[in-house]
Amino acid sequence: MSEHIIVGMSGGVDSAVSALLLKEQGFDVECIFMKNWEEDNPYCTAEQDYNDALLACNHLGLQLKTVNFSKEYKEKVFDLFLKEYAAGRTPNPDTLCNKEIKFKAFLNYALKLGASHIATGHYARLDISNGSFQLRKGIDGNKDQSYFLFMLNQQQLGKTIFPIGEMTKKDVRNLAKEKGLPNHDRKDSTGVCFIGERNFTEFLHQYFKSDPGNMATKGGKTVGKHDGLMFYTLGQRQGLGIGGGHSEKEEPWYVVDKNLKNNKLIVAQGHEHPDLFHSQVIVEDLHWISDYTPSSNELNAKIRYRQKDQPCSVNISNGTANVTFEKPQFAVTPGQAAVFYKDDICLGGGTIESRN
């Protein structure tokens, strides 16, 4: 009897090719579409995603079921997302969604259905070393998604397959086209469902009232007005509305800090302004994939997706990592993830708490 594997289908080409590969390898493949958002949202593509997933499954001769994790998503991901923004931070819901929904709620659901493993269309790879599962970068450096998977544990990785981790995106699309998959040329999704293809500030205004205050330089000069600190992120350039007359320079303005106590948005001019760069970062809520704290020698880190690995030294004590980068990093943002690597192995990471 062949091994039963359940594939999480998103409607995109990556999960469709994952199902295709597993079927061709002789596994007993079942496909499930996760619905994670209940509210009426014209920007959410869940209905179209389901239809695309169904067409792909029909083409492959595979059954597609639907499971609703909207309640779990709201409680475990979205409520924290809003709480973090209200505190002036910038969270990344994708990492928490992977931990709580795709590799917890969905994994547990699949195991109850009798699956031995789940499979997803993530660009990542798995190895075993000394009896421990290692999460490695996907072969395609431009699509590697290990950054978003750093919160997974040994039990989750042991029940997971990443069928396309050894492929490039181009190879995935070419194979999908060769096999006649109807979504072979579907555009990649660019955001989480509840935001979709729209203005991010517009979305946040549904949940937060405006709380206007001053935009000011670090020296205290007022140069504009803001709508509320939660509507801005560090390093932001667009949408500040600071016109001329505030400086002799013609360089654009950037958000460099938030003064929560006085409701001030601190801004500075020029992409190379020193207040936009920090070398020391405090990282908390640490999680290590191997279940033990790694040696801090020769580590690299990313503070955002698709960033090149940045050499750093890491001092870990009492569950906190004090990270010192060799080169100052642009727009280090509290609430975002700092993820640590040794060569192409993702070791784990945590949440950026502060920067110096």
Image: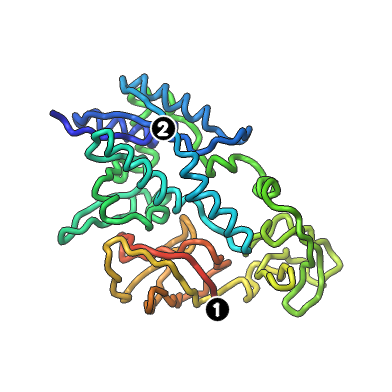
**Mark 2 secondary-structure assignment:** strand
Image quarter in which the C terminus is found:
bottom right
Is 157 on the left or on the right of 274, as rendered?
A: left
Please report the residue visible at 29 percent of the width from the left and 40 percent of the height from the top. Answer: 118
Q: Amino acid at mark 1?
A: Asn
Residue 54 location in percent, x, y? Answer: 42, 23
Is 343 on the left or on the right of 68, as rendered?
A: left
Residue 262 location in percent, x, y? Answer: 74, 72
Callout 2–callout 1 Cβ contact below 8 Å: no
Between residue 135 and residue 118, name the one nearer to us. 118
Looking at the image, what colour scheme do you see?
Answer: rainbow
Please report the residue visible at 54 percent of the width from the left and 44 percent of the height from the top. Answer: 191
Please report the residue visible at 76 percent of the width from the left and 55 percent of the height from the top. Answer: 210
Is 242 on the left or on the right of 289, as rendered?
A: right
**Mark 1 secondary-structure assignment:** loop
303 is higher (above) or lower (below) than 149: below
Q: How many marks?
A: 2
Image quarter in which the N terminus is found:
top left
Write down the residue under mark 1: 356
Between residue 70 and residue 164, name the one nearer to us. 70
Residue 116 location in percent, x, y? Answer: 22, 39
Discs 2/1, front: 2
Mark on residue 87? none
Please report the residue visible at 58 percent of the width from the left and 66 percent of the height from the top. Answer: 331
Determine crowd level at label 2: few under 14, some 14-19, many 20+ residues with C-alpha closer than 10 A. few
Q: Amino acid at mark 2?
A: Val
Residue 312 location in percent, x, y? Answer: 41, 74
Write down the residue under mark 2: 67
Between residue 79 and residue 128, name the one nearer to us. 79
